Amino acid sequence: MVKVWQYAGPAQRRAQGNTQEELDKESLLLPIREGSRRHGCVHWARTVGLVFLVLYSLGLTSITAYLLFTRNRTSPCNGLIHSPARDAVSYETVTFANDLNAESPYIGEPRPELHNAWHNLLKYSNIRVREEDLQKVNRTSVPLNDSKAGFYATLDVFHELHCLNVLREHLYRPHYPTRHSLAEQFQHSNHCIDLLRQTLMCHGDVALQTFTWIDGYRAPWPNFSVQHECRNWDAIQDWAIEHHISDLTGPILTHPTLGVSYQPKG
């Protein structure tokens, strides 16, 4: 048990004959009262608690600021429109290999490897989306008549790539016969040209292209090796693969009055 000493004030001790010097010495030897001890503990606990609260608040603020900073770095546009593929978007820097003599699997004279390269870019364009995704963009779409349900859609990047491929094929029309009339081909080409114009202006790439002097050419020559801020294509394609509709033939797409859209081959 803690011993509680009875307090004797200075006046009382003077009455007992103590000198001021003795009183001063005595005060240094007096035990701390229990009430004062408790008051000190409470004050100490409050101080520690306040310090902890301040440190916790600073830590929480720092974490929040870091998350917002990293989010803005990985997602320059935080979603003005809804897309079910938004979570698949990540950003990276890419230096284009774009010299006039650069080789690419997507250009050149028609050949099987070129056809396969474009086919692989476009083969996952048909995707399945949910009704709630359509509601968020205030759209409707064609329902899919199979056990998985959902609605038919595509990411617009595949439409843009399709248009670029159409223009490429038009450069080599003898190699790519078509049943469409010449007027229809020009109509399709003009549609694609203006779609790509709008797409380029929409994305508004602000990467700097610089110039240099080269022998035998009077005007400044552009440096085509420009570093760009790009969306990671593999991540977008992986998302499309997960939501891909592998076969559109048969009743999965059925017009309300005209019937099945694509008949199975054979």
Image (cartoon, grey):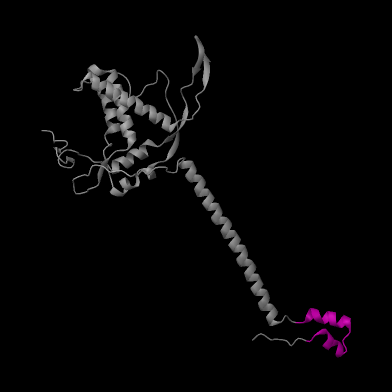
Residue 248 location (% of width, % of height): 19, 38
Q: Is residue 69 above or below residue 199?
A: below
- Residue shown at the point (33%, 35%) measured from the top left: 156
Identity of the residue furthest to the top in this view: 216
Near-viewer residue (7 or 168): 168
For residue 55, what is the image quadrant? bottom right
In the rendered structure, the answer to whether residue 37 lies left or right of residue 207 reads right
Q: Is residue 171 above or below residue 257?
A: above
Q: Magenta stretch: dominant SS? A: helix
Q: Is residue 228 above or below residue 254?
A: above
> Is residue 260 in the magenta section?
no
Q: Quadrant of the N terminus?
A: bottom right
Residue 137 location (% of width, % of height): 34, 44
For residue 37, what is the image quadrant? bottom right
Identity of the residue furthest to the left in this view: 266
- Residue shown at the point (47%, 29%) measured from the top left: 227
Q: Quadrant of the C terminus?
A: top left
In the rendered structure, the answer to whether residue 175 lies left or right of residue 94 reads left
- Residue shown at the point (46%, 42%) measured from the top left: 74
Identity of the residue furthest to the bottom in this view: 16
In the rendered structure, the answer to whether residue 36 lies left or right of residue 134 reads right
Does residue 105 appear in the picture of this structure?
no
Residue 108 location (% of width, % of height): 32, 19
Q: Is residue 86 above or below residue 177?
A: below
Does residue 194 appear in the picture of this structure?
yes
Question: What is the count of numbered marks?
Answer: 0
Stretch of the chain drawn in magenta:
8-30
Residue 122 location (% of width, % of height): 28, 32
For residue 87, what is the image quadrant? top left
Near-viewer residue (191 or 60): 191
> Is residue 12 in the magenta section?
yes
